[in-house]
Image (spheres, rainbow, N blue to C red):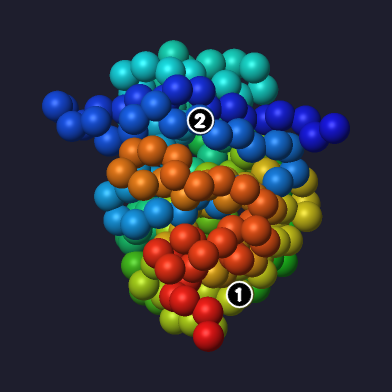
Amino acid sequence: MSELLLEVKDLVVNYGSIQAIKGINFSVNKGEIVSILGANGAGKTTTLRTISGLLKAKSGQILYNGTDLTKVPAHKIVRLGVAQSPEGRQVFGTLTVEENIRLGAFTKKHADKDTLEWIYELFPRLLERRKQLAGTLSGGEQQMLAISRALMAQPQLLLLDEPSLGIAPILVKMIFQAVKKISGHGVTVLLVEQNAKAALKLADRGYVLDVGHVNIEGNAKDLLNDPKVQEAYLGKKD
């Protein structure tokens, strides 16, 4: 029996008078990679930002290890074991690579040396560039850095928002391979990704959001072969 880590129940999120999330339900089990797919404006990033406490829910619950995160401030959510790598990377360009990574441990008394070493094993490019200013890195390298900063918090649940966006295909492949290794290291991953095919090949399960609703859900392999998903996100099969 899989152990439930995250359960989102009847979640509603508003941007002013606009209802961005309209009562969605989904779950993530420990050790899984779960992907949230959907077109631009479907509510994918809003969902992640609400889980991490950057946005407040209008109603509903976000149960993480049994604790309702809707009442918990963002910095305490990190302490509970949830870390986010944000859309657009948002690295600190005037700090070095290693300074950026160490910022991820802001809720800890000390940055963990073993975690830092593991991050450099995952992303050898960052080890080579650790004294370089983050602003001088390529987009793909900055994405590796954003993921590394989140990992430095030693999360149980890693929220990844659009890790392939605007990145060269060869670096996308490296990042997705790293996500597989991160999962193998015991970190549960909730992935929002516009590259639906790559996301479903990596994930165990997936949910498709459509204008604030969960439209389709299921095993990742089943979603890859679902005609509706193929037509909307993958291109029709020959």
User: At x 67% / y 52%, what residue is drawn?
Assistant: 219
Which amino acid type corresponds to the residue marked 1 in the rendered image?
Answer: Met
Which amino acid type corresponds to the residue marked 2 in the rendered image?
Answer: Asn
Horizontally, is 101 left or right of 183 in the view? left
Task: Tell which circle, 2 or 1, labels the residue nearer the N-terminal end.
Answer: 2
Residue 107 visible: no
- Distance between the alpha carbons at the discs numbered 2 and 1: 31 Å
Work out whether residue 230 or residue 123 is closer to the camera in this orientation and state it.
230
Asked which secondary structure carries label 1, the reply is helix
Work out whether residue 93 or residue 190 is closer to the camera in this orientation and state it.
190
Q: Position of residue 108 (x, y in %)?
A: 60, 32
Horizontally, is 10 left or right of 136 in the view? right
Q: Which residue is mark 2?
A: 25
Q: Position of residue 42 (x, y in %)?
A: 33, 47
Q: Which residue is mark 1?
A: 174
Work out whether residue 15 or residue 158 is closer to the camera in this orientation and state it.
15
